[in-house]
Each structure stands twice: as structure tokens, then as C-alpha cells.
Amino acid sequence: MKVIRYQDAEYAEFVQQLDRQAIPSTDLYETVAAIVDAVKQGGNKAVYEYTEKFDKLALTDETLFVSDAELAEAQELVVDSVKEAIAASKKNVHAFAHRSMRQDWNYTNTEGAEVGERFVPYDRVGVYVPGGKAPLVSTALMTAAIGQAVGVTNIIAATPAGANGKVNPSLLYALKESGATQIIKVGGAQAIAAMALGTETVEPVEKIFGPGNSFVVEAKRQLVGAVSIDLLPGPSEVLIIADDSANPAFVAADLLAQAEHGGDSVVGFATTSMELLAKVEIEIERQIKTLSRSAYIRKVLDVGTFALVVENLEEAIRICNVFAPEHLSLIADDEDHWLDKVKTAGAIYVGNFAAVAVGDFLAGPSHTLPTGGSGKSFSGIRADQFQRRTSIVRMDQASVQKSEKYVAEFARVEGLDAHGASVSIRANAE
């Protein structure tokens, strides 16, 4: 873990580098653009070629979709304790989603027109669930189950299968329980392109949700316009801000849990207490010996983990607002005071006992959150993102008459005579 103190010469430069922008490299842009264009031109054939190239899996039209038999097999294979955990998470996800859905409203404006907003679910959305080193069962719940709660009727899920053509049964079970109506065995940028553009057998969706690697995120970015997207969620990250009221064992445990995501994960710790930092380092060494993926975790600690000793908590919060972490753990005296100063964080966990992992799996809010600095512009997945929003205007002649003189001024200034006439003809009708 790289440790930098505010007295160090490199401190200011390092903190400045934490002000990130989620901008792709030219190589990444071009690679993904080629994949998207190939799927646009070649449909299923291109999807199959990239799947064989990247995932070593030969798909056909007959094996592209997860079958009813595979779903039934998953139902039998998943143990009751896993089913209970999925049910508990789904219950909380649905409850949170129902409370955060947008509701229709209306009121009468000054001129007497009735105006308002109407919210309806999308008809067909796509959710992406990464594969790789671990089956992200919880991601099914944190994406598809929110759409299910909102009332989306068609949810297509994309997740890569293994070289044997199988998807993890717990993941299949979770997807089905979360409302997935179709599941394709495809990952990467080609999966995003297939859902956004459609192929001979994949019907295009209206919006795409879910996290992924840099290729998946870039594909979502490039396809905005052809389809709507939720946000740009890339490799996972956490920032822990703590003073000497923090439990060092808890802090170490959260740092290790974040490092377990591996890859390009970012693990950050900012504290005002040198004593706490020393205790956390001891706890990391003690706890890592008990973990099954200790060698894997240690690589992330060596490459993607930093600890900052800051002069005060004001500085730590300033760094947080610049860094825009996916997860923020805030442990300090007078927590509410410091919480009010946080402007940019995907999810905030307050206090010693607020374990980030509970949010990952169970608490209710989606764990699909903005990363790489995109939290300055995006928020995590929300229920209202599964709803279309439409404004409504209803008028009678009296409200048109009250509106006419103002519309006439806008029409005159902008040189749009027909606009003004379309109102006057109604206002003066017998």
C-alpha cells in the first residue's frame, strides 16, 4: 500500500492526479468501435466470432440463449441457503426501488393550463452482468430486479458463459428471480452492441444497464443515441475517510474486501491519524493470511491501493469530492457534520458498522455505481432510470387566451410567425 503524508513533497501532485475524468484511450475507442461496427454489419455472425475469440466459446443460433432446460437445471442445483439470500436481497431491492420511483403529478400554472409529468416503465431493457473470475449473482439483483420492481415487462440479460457453454447456476437463478425474460451467453462489447443494435435473433432494447470492464463501458458510451444507458460503471473502487474514532480492524477488512475485486480496482484510505494507519497496516497483514484469495488481493494492495495522511478532515472531504469514489466509507466523530459536506460519491457508508459488503449484496440501493471519476456527472442505478418521463399539457380556451400575448412576444422575437398564429387562432375562435 502506497502511503503519502501531507508533509511529503509528492503529496500535492498525487492528490491532483485523483481528479479524474472517465475518458477512453484512443486504442480502446478504436478497438470497441470496430467491434460495434462488426456487429452492426454482421449481426449474429460477428457476435459469435468475437465470443469464440475472447471467451473460447462457439455459439450458434440454437445455443445463444439460455434454454428453459438450463434454467430448470439451475433451479435444482442452487441450494436453499443461496435461494434465501437472493430472496432477502430482492425484497430489499424492491422496497428501495418502490420508494424511489417517480410518481405522476400535475398542477395548474398561472395562465390556467394544466401541466404535469407522467412516468411509465420502459418496454424492453438490457442488463449486463460481468463474468470472469466470479459469478456476480448480486449484480443480477442490483440491475434486473430494479426493472422488475418498476414494471419493465421485457428484460434481456447478457452474461458470458464458460468454455463449456454453461452459465453459473446461481447467477441463472438470480437472473430469473430478478425478472430476466431472456438471457444471452455473450459478454464484452459485442454483447452491448447486440442488445443496442439488435441482430437476427436479438431484439434491440431501449436502455442498457450494468457494470463491466473497460470494453463494455466504452461500448455503452459509443452507443448512446442508438440506445439510452444508465451510467459508466467500470472497475470497482472505495475511499475510506476515517479519524481516530475508527476501528482499525473494520477499516482493514473493508480495504481487503475491495481489493478482492482485483483487476483495475482502486482502494483508497484517507486519515488524520498516523496511529490509526499503523494499526490498519498491522490488521491488513493479520487478516490477509486468513483469506482464500490472499495472493490475488496482495497484488491489488501493492499496485492499486493508497493511503493518505491528511492534515484534517476538511482536506479529506475535499479530496473525496474531487476523486468522486464509487464507494465512500465515512467514519468520524460528528458524522452528520462531515456527511453534509460530501458532494460526489456513488454510495456513502456512515459509521464503523456500515460494511460496504452489505451494500454490495443486500441493503437495497443498487451497487452499480459510477467509477473512474464519472460520479461527478452520473449517479448509481435508480428506479426512475427504468421509467420514461413525459410532460403533459392540457389547456382550455381561457388558458390559451391568457397565454397568447406572451407567446406572441416570443414568436415576434424569434421570427416564428406560425407559432404565434397557432395560438391566436385558438384564442380568437368563436
Image (cartoon, grey):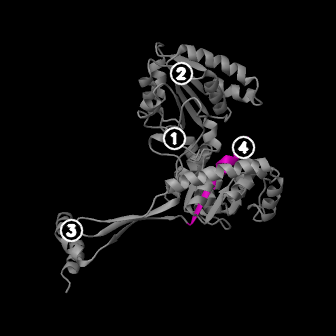
Task: Kindly state the secondary structure of the residue where label 2 is placed.
Answer: loop
Q: Residues within 10 Å of mark 4 (few under 14, many from 20)?
A: few
Residue underneath mark 3:
407
Q: Position of residue 125 (x, y in %)?
A: 58, 61
Structural distance between the alpha carbons of marks 4 and 2 = 38 Å
Quarter placement of the C terminus: bottom left
Please name the amino acid that badge 3 sits on: Val
Label 4 vs 1, first from the N-terminus: 4
Indicate which label's residue lies in the foreground, 4 or 1: 1
Q: Position of residue 363 (x, y in %)?
A: 60, 44
Please name the amino acid that badge 2 sits on: Ser
Q: Residues within 10 Å of mark 2 (few under 14, many from 20)?
A: few
Q: Nearer the viewer, residue 417 or 206?
A: 206
Magenta stretch, residue numbers:
123-140
Structural distance between the alpha carbons of marks 1 and 3 = 42 Å
Residue drawn where x is 72% and y is 29% of the image: 296
- Residue 346: image tag: 1
Q: Position of residue 411 (x, y in %)?
A: 20, 67
In the depicted structure, whether residue 250 falls above or below residue 150: above
Quarter placement of the N terminus: top right
Residue underneath mark 4:
132
Label 3 vs 4, first from the N-terminus: 4
In the depicted structure, whether residue 31 falls above or below residue 406: above
Label 3 vs 2, first from the N-terminus: 2
Residue 367 horizontal side relative to residue 64, left or right: left
Residue underneath mark 2:
245
